[in-house]
Image: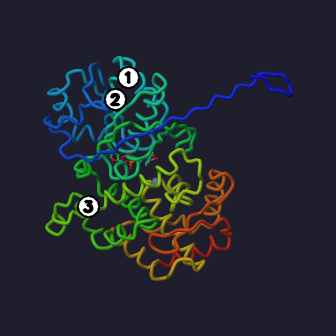
C-alpha cells in the first residue's frame, strides 16, 4: 500500500487471538487410576517423550508417587528437579529446562511438559515453555497455597534478573492447570500463612463473604492447611470455600485485564510498598503483602476513607491467622517514600494506589503525600 503524501510503502497487519485456559480442581491427582495428569490439554494422551519438572521439596514428598503414576501410565516420562526458593528463579534455570526439553525431543504441541511445584517452578517452566520452539503448551500443577490461589489463574511468568524481581518474563498461559488441594498438606505453616496473605487481600478488595469466612475459620484453616480435616470444618468445608472464592475473585479480575494494559488493578492492593520490603527484609511474598495490606489500611484510616471498625476487624482477622502485621521497615519513612516512588515508576508515573473504603470495597487515589506516608507509619507502629 502506498502512503499518498510521501509515496512510500506502509503495511499494517492486524490480528487478534482468543485465549482460553482452564483451571481444574481435582482430587487424588496422583492416583494411577486418575487419568487427568497424563492427559494432554484438549484431550487424548501424549505419544512421545515428556518432561515433568519438580520442585525439590515436592520431589521429596511426592516424587515416588509421581514416578509410580507415570510408570503405570506413560513410560516415556523424564524428570528434572529445580531447587526451591526465589534465588533459583533465574534465566539459567529457564535454559536448563529448555535444554532438557530439547534433549528428550519435546514436540511443538503433542508432548507438553508438566510443572509441578510452587510459584518459582511455575514461573521458570512457564518461561521455558514460552520460549522453546517459540512457545509450546504446558501443564501447571501448583503445589503451594500461593501457587494454587494466585499463580494458577495467571497468564504471566518471569524470572529475577540483575537484582530486579520478575524483570524478564512473558505472557504465556498454559492451557491446563490442575489443582489438588492435598498437595499443600505438606507445606510449612509459614508458607500457608504467606498464601493466606493473598487470600486476605482478595477478601478485602472484593469479597466480604470471604472475609467473614476468614474471621470465623481463619486460625483453624491455617492449622489444618485448608484440608478441612477437623470436626468443625469437615462438613461445611470452609477450606474448599475459601479456595474457590479466592480463585473466583482472582480469575474474574485477571480476565478483565489479562495483558495488564490497564494499570489500575485492584489485585495490586497491598503490593505498593511490599516489593521493596520483601526484597530488603528477605521475607516471603505473602508476608510482605500482608504488611502492605495493613499499612494501606492505615493510610485509608488516616484519610477517613476506612472506618475505624473495619480497620480493627482487618487487624484482628490477620492477627488471628498468625500473620505478621508489620515490620521494622515500616518505621523507615524514607524507605517507604522510595518504595512508593519505585512503584509509581512501575505504574507509568501514577500512584494508582488502591485503598479500602470498606471491607470488599476499594477506590484509587493518586495524591498520597509524604506526610500521610509518615502518619500511616505511626499508626502501624501502634499495633
Ligand atoms: N506468575 C505469576 O503470576 C505469579 C503469581 C504468584 C506468585 N508468583 C511467583 O511465585 C513465587 C512464590 O511462589 P511460592 O510461594 O509458591 O514459592 P516457592 O515456589 O518458592 O515455594 C515455596 C516453598 O515451598 C516448597 N514447596 C512447594 N510445594 C510444596 C509442598 N507441596 N510441600 C512442601 N513444600 C513445598 C518449595 O520447595 C519452597 O521451599 C514468587 O517468585 C512469585 O513472584 C508468580
Ligand atoms: Zn502478590
Mark 2 surroundings within 10 Å by alpha-carbon count, few (fewer than 14), some (14 through 19), many (20 or more)? many
- Tell me if residue 60 comes above or below residue 225 in the rendering: above
Task: Name the residue beneath numbered marker 3.
Answer: 239
Q: Alpha-carbon distance for marks 3 and 1?
A: 36 Å
Distance of mark 3 from mark 2, alpha carbons?
30 Å
Q: Are marks 1 and 2 in contact (CB under 8 Å)?
A: yes
Residue 368: quadrant of the picture: bottom right
Query: What residue is pinned by disc 1?
Result: 101
Badge 2 marks a residue whose secondary structure is loop
For label 3, the SS is helix
Disc nearest the viewer among 3 and 1: 3
Which of disc 1 and disc 3 is earlier in sequence?
1
Identity of the residue drawn at 40% across and 27% down: 97
Viewer-proximal residue, 177 or 377? Answer: 177
Residue 79 position by quadrant:
top left
| Residue 49 spot, x, y in % from top left | 29, 20
Residue 358 location, x and y as percent? 48, 75
Element class at badge 1: helix
Total marks in image:
3
Other-residue count near label 3 (Cα within 10 Å), few / some / many at <14 / 14–19 / ≥20 = many
Residue that label 2 marks: 113
- In the figure, is residue 59 to the left or right of 261? left
Q: Measuring 63% from the left and 53% from the top, which residue is drawn there?
A: 347
Q: Position of residue 326 (x, y in %)?
A: 47, 68
Quadrant of the snapshot with the N terminus = top right
Please report whichever mark, 3 or 2, sits nearer to the chain's N-terminal start.
2
| Residue at the image point whose x is 24% and y is 35% from the top | 37
Whichever of labels 1 and 2 marks the residue nearer the N terminus, that label is 1
Q: Are marks 3 and 1 in contact (CB under 8 Å)?
A: no
Q: Nearer the viewer, mark 1 or mark 2?
A: 2
Amino acid at each position: 500500500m502506498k502512503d499518498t503524501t510521501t509515496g512510500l510503502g506502509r503495511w499494517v497487519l492486524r490480528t487478534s487471538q482468543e485465549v482460553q485456559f482452564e483451571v481444574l480442581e481435582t482430587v487424588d491427582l496422583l492416583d494411577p487410576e486418575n487419568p487427568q495428569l497424563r492427559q494432554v490439554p484438549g484431550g487424548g494422551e501424549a505419544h512421545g517423550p515428556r518432561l515433568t519438572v519438580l520442585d525439590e521439596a515436592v520431589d521429596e514428598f511426592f516424587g515416588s508417587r509421581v514416578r509410580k503414576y507415570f510408570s503405570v501410565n506413560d513410560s516415556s516420562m523424564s524428570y528434572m528437579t529445580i531447587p526451591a526458593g526465589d534465588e533459583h528463579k533465574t534465566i539459567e534455570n529457564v535454559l536448563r529446562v529448555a535444554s532438557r526439553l530439547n534433549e528428550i525431543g519435546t514436540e511443538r504441541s503433542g508432548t507438553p511438559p508438566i510443572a509441578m511445584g510452587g510459584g518459582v517452578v511455575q514461573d521458570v517452566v512457564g518461561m521455558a515453555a514460552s520460549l522453546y520452539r517459540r512457545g509450546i503448551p504446558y501443564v501447571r500443577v501448583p503445589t503451594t497455597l500461593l501457587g494454587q490461589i494466585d499463580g494458577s489463574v495467571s497468564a504471566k511468568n518471569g524470572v529475577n534478573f540483575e537484582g530486579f524481581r520478575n524483570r524478564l518474563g512473558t505472557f504465556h498461559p498454559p492451557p491446563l492447570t490442575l489443582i489438588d488441594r492435598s498437595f499443600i498438606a505438606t507445606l510449612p505453616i509459614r508458607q500457608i500463612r504467606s498464601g493466606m496473605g493473598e487470600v486476605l487481600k482478595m477478601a478485602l478488595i472484593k469479597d466480604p463473604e470471604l472475609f467473614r469466612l476468614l474471621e470465623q475459620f481463619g486460625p483453624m484453616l491455617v492449622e489444618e492447611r485448608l484440608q478441612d480435616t477437623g470436626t468443625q470444618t469437615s462438613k461445611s468445608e470452609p477450606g474448599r470455600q475459601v479456595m474457590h472464592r479466592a480463585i473466583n475473585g482472582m480469575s474474574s479480575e485477571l480476565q478483565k485485564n489479562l495483558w495488564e494494559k490497564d494499570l489500575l488493578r485492584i489485585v495490586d492492593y497491598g503490593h505498593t510498598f511490599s516489593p521493596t520490603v520483601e526484597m530488603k527484609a528477605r521475607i516471603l511474598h505473602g508476608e510482605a503483602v500482608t504488611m502492605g495490606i495493613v499499612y494501606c489500611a492505615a493510610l485509608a484510616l488516616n484519610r477517613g476513607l476506612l472506618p475505624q471498625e473495619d480497620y480493627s476487624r482487618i487487624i484482628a482477622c490477620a492477627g488471628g491467622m498468625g500473620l505478621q502485621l508489620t515490620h521494622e521497615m515500616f518505621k523507615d519513612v524514607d524507605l517507604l517514600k522510595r518504595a512508593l516512588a519505585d512503584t509509581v515508576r512501575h505504574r507509568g508515573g501514577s500512584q494508582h494506589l488502591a485503598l479500602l473504603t470498606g471491607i470488599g470495597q476499594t477506590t484509587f487515589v493518586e495524591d498520597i503525600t509524604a506526610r500521610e506516608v509518615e502518619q500511616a507509619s505511626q499508626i502501624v507502629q501502634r499495633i
